[in-house]
Image: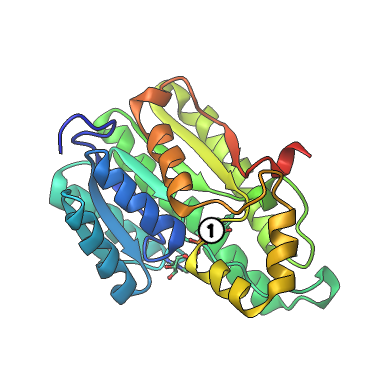
Amino acid sequence: MNGGILEGKVTLVTGAGGGIGRATAVVLGQAGAKVLVSDVSTRRGEETADLVRGAGAEAEFFKADVSRAADVEALIATAVKRWGRLDCAHNNAGISGTVVNVADDTEENWDRTLAVDLKGVWLCMKYEIQQMLKQGGGSIVNTASTAGLLGAVRMGAYAAAKHGVVGLTRTAALEYARSNIRVNAICPGVVGTPVILGWFEANERLKKAMIAQEPIGRVGEPQEIGNAVAWLLSDHASFVTGAAIPIDGGMTAQ
Ligand code: NAD
């Protein structure tokens, strides 16, 4: 592929076996990037790598659980071994956790949600930034959520983790701004990933309620999130760092 905004860049997407990560991996490939696809699910991750190759780009799959330091260290080392560097990373793996009020939550749900959604992003950034410092720069986009900017009823652990992602993003952006490493977060609203579309099929009332949160009158397409990530990762966003950008059909403007 020639002439894309990420031409020749070595990129990583975590949680790339799922809706937003998969769509982003394909968009990055279409934009000219080499893509290291990662997920805890080998089957879904390999499917995504095939889709990226189908889009004409180089892709590899590496299985990693982002909540485990050894997995994440090996993941970043894989990019360097395969392509010699890591220019861009989309730290996107996440789980929603149990849907429950704060006082009814369990320690197990709290620990697991924070481990994947917040510690996972920190671990990814830790090893990505170490590599980017060695090579003289890079660009990182973390997936937060509108739940990183607003409260999210019955999703306290998730909202806490996603607010944490925004705080961590801003902090890392400040710490590494002079090292040519940009760090931003995206805050998607309701996105029509296979999981969410499955909920919609099972529950018409939930579908109406979720769409009603979106002033634009529909849910987002995973590719619309991927387009924003590709731009943020690219040199077209060279003056953007420390931002937490809603991609939410106007939800947080209300
Ligand atoms: P998804 O469930 O379709 O995909 C998430 C992927 O992450 C899955 O393939 C899963 O296997 C993987 N994963 C889970 N735990 C992991 C771990 N420990 N290590 C590595 N991979 C792991 O979900 P999605 O909707 O595509 O969500 C992607 C990101 O976007 C998440 O961080 C989510 O919180 C965020 N988000 C989604 C929405 C939405 O409406 N879909 C809105 C806002 C934010």
Quadrant assignment for the C terminus: top right
Residue 130 is situated, as x and y percent measured from the top left of the image, at 35, 41
Colour scheme shown? rainbow
| Closer to the camera in the image, 144 or 103 | 144
Disc 1 within 8 angstroms of ligand 1 (CB): no
User: What residue sits right under mark 1 in the picture?
Assistant: 119
Specify the quadrant that holds the N terminus.
Answer: top left
Q: In what element is the residue under mark 1?
A: helix
Q: Position of residue 24 (x, y in %)?
A: 38, 50
Residue located at (85% from left, 73% from top): 103
Q: Is 207 in front, or is 30?
A: 207
Q: Residue at x 22, y 51 (%)?
A: 79
Q: Quadrant of residue 101?
A: bottom right
Q: Nearer the viewer, residue 226 or 163?
A: 226
Expressed as whole percent of the image width and height from the top left, the position of residue 11 reads 29, 45
Q: Amino acid at mark 1?
A: Lys
Residue at the image position 62 percent from the left and 55 percent from the top: 190
In terms of depth relative to the viewer, which is nearer, 141 or 21? Answer: 21
Relative placement, left or right, of 4 versus 234 is left
Q: Residue furthest right?
A: 103
**Residue 34 to residue 14: above or below:** above
